[in-house]
Image (tube, grey):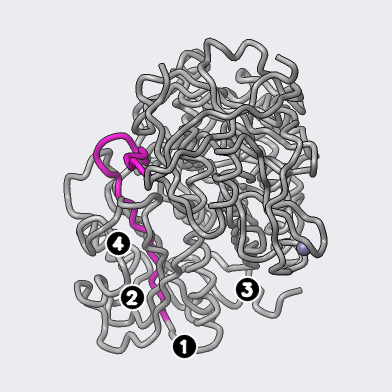
Amino acid sequence: MWAGRGKTAVAGIGFSQLTRTHERPLGQLAIEACRAAIADAGIEPSQIDGLATHPDQPFRGAGNRAGEDLVPAAFLIDHLDIGPEVEWYAQVSAGLIPSAIIEALNALMAGACTYALVWRAMHRPAGTYGAWREPFAGGDSQFTAPYGYTSPFQLHAVAYQRYMHRYGATREEMASLVTNSRANAQLNEAAFFNGTPMSVDDYLAARMISEPICLFDCDIPVEGCAALVLTTAERARDLPRPPAYVAAWGQHTAARPTYVNYMLDDYMACGASTAGKLWSRSGLGPGDVDAAQLYDGFSPSTYYWLEAAGFCPEGEAHAFVQDGRVALGGELPVNTFGGSLSEGRLHGMGHIAEAARQVSGRAGPRQVEGAEVSIALDGSPLLRGAGLLFTREA
Amino acid sequence: MTPDRPRPVLDALSRAYWEAAGRGELAIQRCEECGHYQHPPRPLCERCTSSDLAYPAVSGRGVVHSFTTNHQRNVAGFERAVPYVNLIVELEEQAELYLLSDLPAGEADWVAIGAPVEVAFEPIEAAEGEAIALPQFRPAGG
Ligand SMILES: [Zn+2]
């Protein structure tokens, strides 16, 4: 078991408004989310003495200017009324937001800071999201772009095609998972699709993007920010809100394949490695989890996480998500906040915030009764998988 | 409709691959120490870290590992090619050795996971204007 189990906690959670278009500078939204997280923690901004983020936008050219479409640490140091004593910060340049959270947890345990603010600010550029516009293709893209193969949804489409072929999965089965997330979003006022229900027929009628990936298999890109205040367990106990204790973190960095050679088996290997670290560090297992927040930048990723983390046998997630098993009140509620599919694309921060809320009893109308353990697994598992396991008790 | 393809920028690692394709040969980077093939080419062998790397010709035969039919107008130059199919081809020389291919959706009736394919070469220009070719995969014996 990991010596750090239960030594740190989420003390505060804050969200900005999540919008479909770029109406306000991203820096304003980030400040809004960070102030909300600090107020939620019941501390003063001047008590923040550590900062961590993964500031990058998901494709080249999407984030160019600090405060406008990108929110690096320097922007918050300059614009948030935090104390002058911020001497520790981390800005991870690759990977996912859990990587920044892991940095912050380690800094808290090392005594490098006492209250760390972690945020993820996402820009939603105008035009077709992530379109390839260049006449030339260098680097690894010289082997993909000349074939018109440049987008994450294409990568996911070939993996999901293979999954469907290998295990006999159907789009009708996926409709159960996607509509479950949409139903959960009706209980989450912050969700972009709150107020917009979806039926199985709506899902099946959606236009195809890259077969078998349809429009509603893709998450909804938004402009917005979510932020967390992290602190040590000792300090968290004295704050007004019930803490969400960190039981373990896990990360997989070994395989860095490219668009040419990243296939279904790689997703599974990366996912199993990430989840395995969470189980061995915490001493817990899939059977202990009361609510699972499983990344769904593209819906099939949730299948891969269900299998790779051991919630069901490999090849069976498409059957596992039927019959209300992953619904609120089911055997394993999944993406209780609506997921990225229905809350909005925050690249995993929404999943982490929800996992923390569930174990601290703060999930409102979607609270899983008596939730003691909740997991957030981020990544597709794509390029890098990372996750966090939270518990109600330290 | 034939797409207006983004043109490859040849570099020290990729030049041998593209020049071979221009001669009608599929040449894949291989480690001279351990025999491991890798694509895209890399500065070191990803299996044994040797820097002794060559680009021998391979058979050009393989099978369809997976595929997708693209409907989104998402790649400049491919707007009028939609819908088109991308194939992921696994070469017979080594497990998990993959190359891409594309074809119009209207010509893809034969496409299925496991379908045998062989290489064909489509003349293109590199970024600097050199005449090279793009390896494409078509039904074996077709
Ligand atoms: Zn080697």
- Please provide percent x and percent y for residue A200: 52, 17
Residue placed under numbered mark 2 in the picture = A43
The disc numbered 4 marks a residue on which chain?
A
Q: State which mark lies toward you, 2 or 4.
A: 4
Q: CB under 8 Å between callouts 2 and 1?
A: no
Helix, strand or loop at mark 4: helix
Residue A271 visible in the picture: no
Q: Which mark is residue A36?
A: 4
Please tell me how crowded label 4 is: few (under 14), some (14-19), or many (20+) other residues with Cα within 10 Å: many
Say if labels 4 and 1 share a chain.
Answer: yes
Q: Earlier in the sequence, mark 2 or mark 3?
A: 3
Question: Label 1 is placed on what type of residue?
Answer: Ala
Q: Chain of mark 3?
A: A
The picture quadrant where one finds residue A388 is bottom right
In space, the residues marked 2 and 4 are separated at their CA atoms by 11 Å
Q: In the rendered view, does A388 fall on the left or right side of A53?
A: right
Residue marked by disc 3: A6
Give the distance between the C-alpha atoms of the residues marked 2 and 3, in whole angstroms: 21 Å
